[in-house]
Image (cartoon, rainbow, N blue to C red):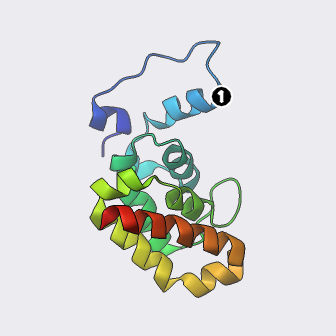
Amino acid sequence: MKSIEQLENDYWTEPNEFTSGLVATCHMYRKIPIDELTIEQLRLLISQKVGLKHIIEIGISELDKNILAEGDFYEGDLLMAISNVQSEFWNENKTEFLTFKNIVERNSELIKFELGEKKFDRINTNIKASVQQCV
């Protein structure tokens, strides 16, 4: 499978000494074949909107296997990253959005129990905002 930079045919110049750690990390992750990305790598790239159209399905698939999939921060951090994807992206990727929404609905009790009502409400607020955009 190809990497984000291969799929986008967009090869960033090598980071320099003035590049932030985040930019250098994203630069490195863009070179990894997308089917080899870890939960943490997916979480970071999705949260930074890097290669989103190429990796969102993989992230959603990971949530389907484990709604509380965990990167380096906390249980459910991939879920939170995907729930923060902008409505404009979902409007152009309605099938993926509906899949994501259904996975969240199917796992709502587990999310509430494990992450708490506050995070669940934030996820739901983001989904509702996107539903209005996708209609």
Specify few, some or many for label 1: CA neighbours under 10 Å numbering under 14, 14-19, or 20 or more. Answer: few
**Drawn side of residue 128 relative to residue 78, left or right:** left
Q: How many marks?
A: 1
* Residue 14 percent across, percent down from the top left: 49, 16
In the image, 104 versus 39, the foreground residue is 104
Q: Secondary structure at mark 1?
A: helix
Determine whether 81 is above or below 123 in the image: above
* Residue 133 percent across, percent down from the top left: 36, 61
Q: Amino acid at mark 1?
A: Gly
The structure residue drawn at horizontal position 49% and vertical position 76%, both measured from the top left corner, is: 104
* Residue 38 percent across, percent down from the top left: 52, 52
The structure residue drawn at horizontal position 65% and vertical position 28%, both measured from the top left corner, is: 21
Q: Quadrant of the rendered structure where residue 8 is? A: top left
**Drawn side of residue 106 relative to residue 92, left or right:** right
The structure residue drawn at horizontal position 68% and vertical position 53%, both measured from the top left corner, is: 72
Determine whether 105 is above or below 36 in the image: below
* Residue 31 percent across, percent down from the top left: 42, 33
Q: Quadrant of the C terminus?
A: bottom left
**Which residue in the protein does label 1 denote?**
21
Q: Quadrant of the rendered structure where residue 25 is? A: top right
In the image, 128 versus 79, the foreground residue is 128
